[in-house]
Image (cartoon, rainbow, N blue to C red):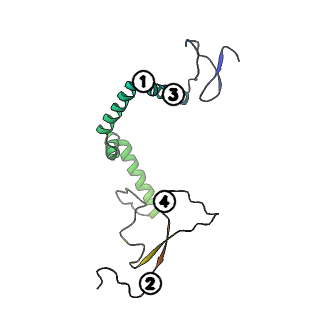
Amino acid sequence: MSTRTFICQHCQRRVKKNARLKGEQHYCGLAACQQARKDKWERERSRSDPAYLAKRNLAKKNWYRDYPGDRYQHFYRQAHCDYTNSNREKQQKRGKKITGKQAAPKIVKTDSLSSESLIPRGLYMLLPYEKTEREKVVKTDALIVELRSCCDFQGIMLPGTG
């Protein structure tokens, strides 16, 4: 390997050394590589210096206190009015394109259940879902059950029906 080049420890590319840097150079100037260098420095410093780690944790705690997660969107929209208005206009155009009429003014969560019940009232049995080997469950923490109607049961009274 030439003394004028080195292999970046992050992207593994051979690059020219920066003549202005003294000592060994291990990372090139790409933003991702510089971020990797900073992350490595911070991990090592946190491991070796308990005072630095305590100071960093206190700063995080104070930041989370001042910017609570449940208010993030509110703060962001207040600070970025142009983006908010542009997004609202685009959403109305998308809604109009889909439905053919003006979209509702506010769409917060499109996949939430509507007020209409998808399943009629009644008595049901929840059974464990038996998947075949060919089926693939993508979300492993989801509760998947089989829902069977119990309309054949006789003599079972629902609470409050008499």
Lower position in the chain sequence, tag 3 or tag 2: 3
Residue for point 35% across, 40% down: 80
Label 4 SS: loop
- Which label sits in the foreground, 4 or 1? 1
Residue for point 70% across, 15% down: 2
Residue 87 lies, with reference to residue 115, above or below; the image says above
Residue type at numbered disc 2: Cys
User: What whole-number distance in Å separates the C-alpha atoms at marks 3 and 1?
Assistant: 14 Å
Numbered tag placed on residue 49 in the rendering? 1
Question: Would residue 76 be found to the left or right of residue 39 on screen?
Answer: left
Looking at the rendered image, the quarter that the C terminus falls into is: bottom left
Callout 4: 10 Å neighbours few (<14), some, many (20+)?
Answer: few
- Determine which residue is flagged by label 3: 40
User: What whole-number distance in Å separates the C-alpha atoms at marks 4 and 1?
Assistant: 41 Å
Residue type at numbered disc 4: Ala
Callout 1: 10 Å neighbours few (<14), some, many (20+)?
Answer: few
Residue type at numbered disc 3: Lys
Callout 2: 10 Å neighbours few (<14), some, many (20+)?
Answer: few
Lower position in the chain sequence, tag 3 or tag 1: 3
- Determine which residue is flagged by label 4: 142
Relative depth, front residue between 151 and 67: 151
Numbered tag placed on residue 151 in the rendering? 2
Lower position in the chain sequence, tag 4 or tag 3: 3
Residue 88 position in % (x across, y down): 38, 51
- Which residue is situated farthest in the bottom direction here? 154
Question: Would residue 122 be found to the left or right of residue 134 on screen?
Answer: left
User: What whole-number distance in Å separates the C-alpha atoms at marks 4 and 3?
Assistant: 35 Å
User: What whole-number distance in Å separates the C-alpha atoms at marks 1 and 2?
Assistant: 67 Å
Residue for point 45% across, 75% down: 125
